[in-house]
Amino acid sequence: MSEYDNVWLVIPAYNEGQVIAEVVEGARKTFPNIVVVDDGCTDDTAQHVMTTGAHLVRHPVNLGQGAALQTGLKYALEQEGAEYFATFDADGQHQTADVEKMVALLREGEADIVLGSRFIEQTGQVPWIKRVVLRTAAAVSPTARKLKLTDAHNGLRVMNREAASRIKITMNGMAHASEIVSFLAGSDLRVAEVPVDILYTDYSRAKGQSLINGVNILFDISLRERNRR
Amino acid sequence: MNHLWIQLILVVAAVAMALLFVRRWDAANTRAWKRIAFALFVIANVVAILWPSGVTKLATALGVGRGTDLVLYLMVIAMGFLTLNTYLRFRSLEKKLTDLARTVAITEGVRHNSDRLDTPVGSDH
């Protein structure tokens, strides 16, 4: 038994075979419950996950990170005793210490969802071009402004059951981050933001989304309204 | 020459496209309109083939110089609707595929994980 028995980590993974086992085992030292969503990987990610104690859910085809997150959340919500849900990156850039901090905040009952931010405390680890783009994205996004968020595109989030069951990610691709933020802005859920450390390793840098992909995200978002039935 | 008619038609078509984009595309009455549009298209084809000078007469009446130009304009409109239709159809297919894949993934996951991890795995909420 651990004090984090009611916490579930959701890790979407697409071709992360190189690092996934290490990331999962590292996180499992603190969080016993982990579900990795294999988003139709073409590498050996699934085999690596099976060497660990994490749950594995496999999309039969590649759908995108947003879809993988939603699948993972749905799976975790169905597990007995699950109360807190964290979305965690597969490439090792998130720290379990940050998740502990965020869970503690939720347990105090002050918020329904806690988002990680790279910009509350200047850690100097974020590459400057990324910093400019992400800060601009947060500043021009009306929903992020409404919630007073400093970082609308951080993959590290921890939420309680209420928030997890109400979030429905429909943007399969990378636009889900903005989708979640705009959903939160329109809901009565209490949102908090805490500083987190992101490790920009060579691996995560190479795997990370390129800035040009921001164009795709903007396009997807502009079309989202009509898809919300 | 009076360009008003063709301008009106083109603007209405553009607005209709924008409206369809933000409204439900697969609603039954939208589908009916698509069928009506298709029927009109077929009739217009037959008329244009049997009576080529009619197209030019119509074009002149609408304020377009030549029949060829009118056909070009209408083709642009048709092309726009077609692209939109295809895009929205893909979106709706993608949603269905996602729901299907998610159901398969979770059902399989529950089965495999309870075997592999030797713990009960919930799925019946």
Image (cartoon, coloured by chain):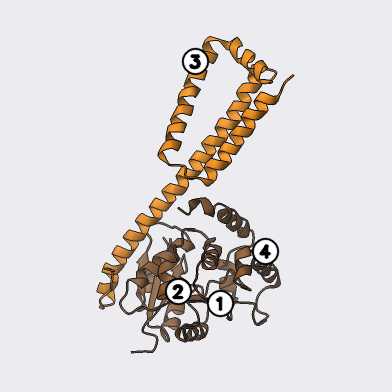
Chain colours: A brown, B orange
Secondary structure under badge 1?
strand
Q: CA distance from mark 4 to mark 2?
A: 34 Å
Q: CA distance from mark 4 to mark 3?
A: 53 Å
Residue A89 vertical placement versus A196 (above, below) = above
Residue A40: % across, % down: 41, 60
Look at the image and tell me whether residue A96 can be seen.
no
Residue wearing tag 3: B46
Secondary structure under badge 3?
helix
- Please tell me which residue lies in front, A157 or B63: B63
Q: Residue at x 47, y 69 (%)?
A: A16
Q: Between tags 4 and 3, which lies in front?
A: 4
Mark on residue A20? 2
Residue neighbourhood size for the residue with mark 2, other residues' Cα within 10 Å, grouped as few (<14), some (14–19), many (≥20): many
**Disc 2 residue type?**
Ile
Dot 1 or dot 4: first in sequence order is: 1
Q: Between tags 4 and 2, which lies in front?
A: 4
Q: What is the chain identity of the residue bearing mark 2?
A: A
Q: What is the chain identity of the residue bearing mark 4?
A: A
Residue A64 vertical placement versus B118 (above, below) = above
Q: CA distance from mark 1 to mark 4?
A: 19 Å
Residue wearing tag 4: A140
Q: Residue at x 50, y 23 (%)?
A: B41
Residue neighbourhood size for the residue with mark 3, other residues' Cα within 10 Å, grouped as few (<14), some (14–19), many (≥20): few
Residue A147: % across, % down: 59, 71
Q: Residue at x 62, y 16 (%)?
A: B58
Residue wearing tag 1: A116
Mark on residue A191? none
**Disc 4 residue type?**
Val
Q: What is the chain identity of the residue bearing mark 1?
A: A
